[in-house]
Image (spheres, grey):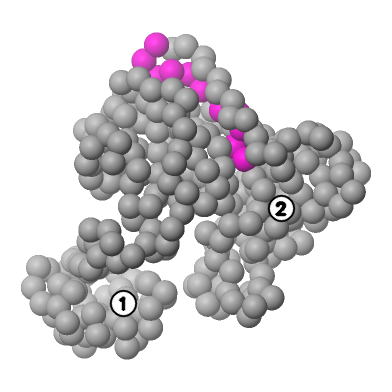
Amino acid sequence: MNQGCVYTDRIDRAAVGLTVVDYYCQRYRHSGVEEWRSRIESGLVQLDGALTTHETTLTLGQTLTYYRPPWQEPEVPCRFDLLYEDEDLLVVVKPSGLPVMPGAGFLENTLLGQLRQRYGDFDYNAAKTKDAMSPAPIHRLGRGTSGLVLIARSPLAKQKLSQQMRDRKMNKQYLALCQGVMREDELVIEQAIAKVPHPDLGYLYGPQDGGLYSRSDVRVVERRSDSTLVEVTILTGRAHQIRIHVAWAGFPLYGDPLYGVGGKAKLRNELGEVPVPGDCGYWLHAYRLGFVHPRSGEALTFVAPAPAMLSVN
């Protein structure tokens, strides 16, 4: 069992007039009306620091707090490799299956949770402030994606590395195994990505004209009988960008349970279940990362060896 978690929400204009139970049902769709009503009535939810009822109407600026009791998290591979460490940053290699951030039932069985165990306790919310000295990821990888993750340990590193990300001066290259055999040696994919409606999850990210500009440069490394090993350089870092882009181009990631040809999400799998973004099974590895050290100004490049499935035969 983990230690439980506290979730805090501030009521904005869009939520004014909703009841407490309606707010949670609309914002956190993983649970239904009866589950949220039971939590509220058992005292796990407070409104402005006091117990509330499920029928209470919300007003602008109020604060809802949900005290989630400890729970048994799904088992995941929690071991990670440390490639570099100094006072400002860490470069780690995470395995496929290990989430980077808390969410979707994971709290301590995450990369941040494991960093807390190794480097001591820290407050993730504090890591968002300019005075934070706690480990904070500069970028994220999907749960099913393996490879390099850059972690800031100082305010200087967080500020300067984040700026490199925004200015697209950080080099990130991936190896991916795609379904089908690509004819072209190179592809430049610039399909915009945005939130798209989903009947069960509320929304997912997907290809959407008018969305955020996104670019992935794809180069064929090896053609196989029914798949293609590619190197992907991303100039932007949208959610699930590579998965969406290669699927949109007609070559979904091999084993991807969510994104099919055209980049649209599959609504049900072969078992009749709803696939979610955190489902694993696809082959994607962040194998090269280049950036400028925030303190020394030195150009650094790190490489994480690829899994056998993503190695050239």
Q: Which span of residues is magenta-colored? A: 285-296
Q: Quadrant of residue 107 in the image? A: bottom left
Q: Between residue 69 and residue 54, name the one nearer to us.
A: 69
Q: Quadrant of residue 20 in the image? A: bottom left
Image point 61% across, 54% down: which residue?
193
Q: Between residue 147 and residue 231, name the one nearer to us.
A: 147
Q: From what the image shows, is residue 153 above or below residue 250?
A: above
Image location of residue 105, percent across then percent down: 39, 63
Which dot, 2 or 1, sits closer to the camera?
2
Lower sequence index among marks 2 and 1: 1
Classify residue 71 as left or right of residue 138.
Answer: left
- The residue singled out by tag 1 in the image is 23
Q: Quadrant of residue 146 in the image? A: top right
- The residue singled out by tag 2 in the image is 253
The three-letter code of the residue at mark 1 reads: Tyr
Classify residue 194 as left or right of residue 180.
Answer: left
Q: From what the image shows, is residue 195 above or below residue 187?
A: below
